[in-house]
Image (tube, helix red, strand yellow):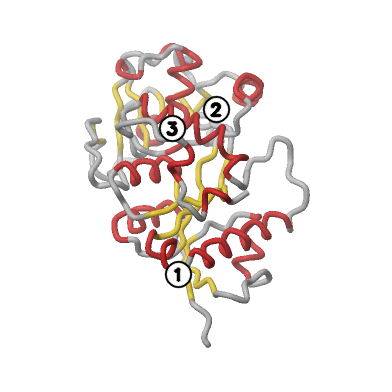
Amino acid sequence: MEKPKLRAVLGNHLHVQAVKSGELRSDAFDLDFVEYTPTNTAFKPMVREQAFDVCEMAIVTYLMAKAHGKPLVLLPATMLGRFQHGYALYRAGGAKLGPVDLAGKRVGIRSFTTTTGAWIRGILANDYGVNLDEINWITFEDPHVAEYIDRTARAPKGKNVLQMLKDGELDAVLGETSTDPAFAPLFADPDAEAQRWYRQHGVVPVNHLVVVTEQLAKSRPDLVRGVYDLLKGGKMKMGTPGKPDLVPFGVEANRKPLELIIDYAFQQALIPRRFSVDELFDDTTRDLN
């Protein structure tokens, strides 16, 4: 019998290279990889059309998709985790700008619903006391989840977020990093502030995990478990993870970051209620560790 072939989109992360190259494979199924560059451009067709069987997905996109009844199921397999403090910039050369100075300022972000944006806004609101409603948000793209009503101002068509910052049309941007000396970090010492934040919260901010279609999860839960095991094998092939582990696998390893991003997403009205972590999974994926 021919093995099932699952259409899959995963970024070119170090811990999935062995899976994407075919060095690690399953006896039960094959993964047919579809390349999207950048990977986040696959999120919209996955949310709106369930275009793939397996897909990397930003966690806030998944939370919003779940809130609107999209037939997707989460796997506790982190593809991308990182500390967020280095992804906030302002224009160098003028008055110094810090987190507490953002009231009344024009802040650009690719889309208001990006996961990096949600993490940084949560940090600004909860750790620096910033009133997010007093910021003038300027966005450049629609949300992946069509049902979400974006009330932010839209940048003129064709404009680039970093160029607008450089030209003085924005005061700060979130979700971007650059070595251009025209820009300075909004958090004065991003690495030190990230370390301090980690000591306080004990959480690595997870950005991207993996989802499968509900149809696959219901019809072939064995294949869903197999996908998770394959991805976990790719991570294990990389050796002992660093401390902290930036790509945690398993429900329990991801519970604290998921609880926190759920809180942030709810505070920012990206989702209508706080989900429990266990609600994000189904009967198959809830037991994966």
> From the viewer's perspective, is residue 178 above or below residue 104?
below
Earlier residue among tags 1 and 3: 1
Mark 1 neighbour class, 10 Å CA radius: few under 14, some 14 to 19, many 20 or more: some
Q: Judge depth for marks 1 and 2 and give the one in front.
A: 1
Mark 3 neighbour class, 10 Å CA radius: few under 14, some 14 to 19, many 20 or more: many
> From the viewer's perspective, is residue 107 above or below residue 37?
above
Taking the spot 41% from the left edge, 62% from the top edge, the residue there is 218
Residue that badge 2 annotates = 85
Residue that badge 3 annotates = 262
Q: Position of residue 166 (x, y in %)?
A: 40, 30
Q: Position of residue 135 (x, y in %)?
A: 32, 19
Cα–Cα span, label 1 and label 2: 34 Å
Q: Name the amino acid, label 3.
A: Ile
The dot on residue 20 is none
Earlier residue among tags 1 and 2: 1
Mark 2 neighbour class, 10 Å CA radius: few under 14, some 14 to 19, many 20 or more: many
Earlier residue among tags 3 and 2: 2
Quarter location, residue 36: bottom left
Frontmost residue, 282 versus 270: 282
Taking the spot 62% from the left edge, 72% from the top edge, the residue there is 26
> From the viewer's perspective, is residue 8 above or below residue 284?
below
In the picture, measured across the screen, residue 113 lies left or right of residue 240, that is left
Residue that badge 1 annotates = 7
Frontmost residue, 167 versus 132: 132
Frontmost residue, 139 versus 288: 288
Secondary element under disc 2, as helix, strand or loop, is loop
